[in-house]
Image (cartoon, helix red, strand yellow):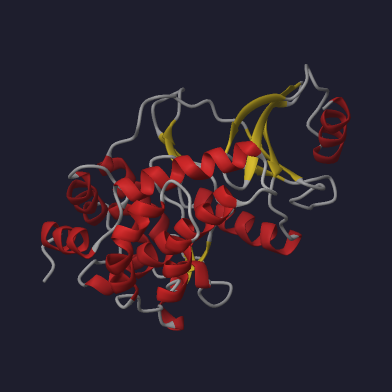
Amino acid sequence: MEDVTSAVTRAYALGEALGPLVYAARGELGRIWRLDTTGGSWAVKELLVPVEERDARADTAYQVAAAAAGVRLPRPRLTTDGAVLSGRFRVYEWVELVLGEEVTGAELGTVTAGLHRVPHPAGGPATPWFAEPVGRECWEALAAAGGEWAPALGRLLPELAALDALVVPPEPGSLVTCHRDLNLENVLRAADDGGVVVLDWENCGPGRPSQELAKTLAGLPGDGAAGAYEAYLAADGPARITEPADFSMAIAEQGHLLEFYARRALSPEEPAENRSRARARLATMLARPLTRARIDALLAAFGAR
């Protein structure tokens, strides 16, 4: 990685490297490497999925707007030519995090409210991944494809297919730019002052705030969603959850994620690491799926009718 270190430090004018890139973490879209230089410490993201500069500029613009509105995040770094990307890499300032300590549901609700108050218009129509169901034909194909998860998926198939009928794509006039990946993996605690930091902005794009809020709260463990919703309202969050259709983004994403992980886990062309991660994700999702019963329970906890 010596050549990469040199190329990245030059492209982003980071200063002289004090050592090699050090592996820090990985997600579905990329690996994170730490780079210490005379100019500071940096998070170098190695992209595992191709990204267009146009799209990187769009998510960076939202990050800049969110930071200006008071949302704490790792500041993106531009190249000396003003670009976001340099080959398959992009760079952020390094933020030291508290590992192994989750933020509370109330903190997640508060930061979601802050993001929803950022006045940033949508850059286009809703993305099918977040707005359209996968459909019964897809569910049946996945259940028949095999894999150790197939029995659990088969048992859930009627429930999952019925959920698809609840999905209502958001009207264009209701769309703004949303983070679209707010969860306890991407909202973490800073080591310096214990504050909340929002990470992983590459999935941001058009969304309806009420649908993003419902998806975020549905992902919380236990009964934390009600407290998170109260904190959201107390922080002047503009969205309200009132009906099953507000869970459209959560339902659509659940379907597309299950399809994505199942196909990745079964693909002989995927690296072993990717197949293993996909199997683990499938097990987690199928152990606690979003169902109509959970949606009804959440609506009741939120005081919705």
Q: Residue at x 48, y 49 (%)?
A: 147
Q: Nearer the viewer, residue 241 or 145?
A: 145
| Above-or-below relation of 163 to 84 | below
Identified at 85% across, 40% down, the residue is 11
From the viewer's perspective, tell me whether residue 39 is left or right of residue 81: left
> Who is closer to the viewer here, 16 or 142?
142
Q: How many marks?
A: 0
Q: Position of residue 143 (x, y in %)?
A: 42, 61
Residue positioned 64% across, 62% down in the render: 58
Residue 207, how many percent across, how many down?
Answer: 45, 69
- Image quadrant where residue 113 sits: bottom left
Q: Is residue 247 above or below residue 79?
A: below
Q: Residue at x 29, y 46 (%)?
A: 220
Image location (x, y in percent) of residue 138:
47, 70
Place of residue 194 in the rendered image (x, y in percent of width and height, measured from the top left): 39, 27
The quarter of the image holding the C terminus is: bottom left
Residue 258's quadrant in the figure? bottom left
The quadrant in which the N terminus is found is: top right
Q: Is residue 253 above or below residue 281?
A: below
Asked where in the image residue 296 lies, by quadrant, the reply is: bottom left
Residue 131 or 162: which is nearer the viewer? 162
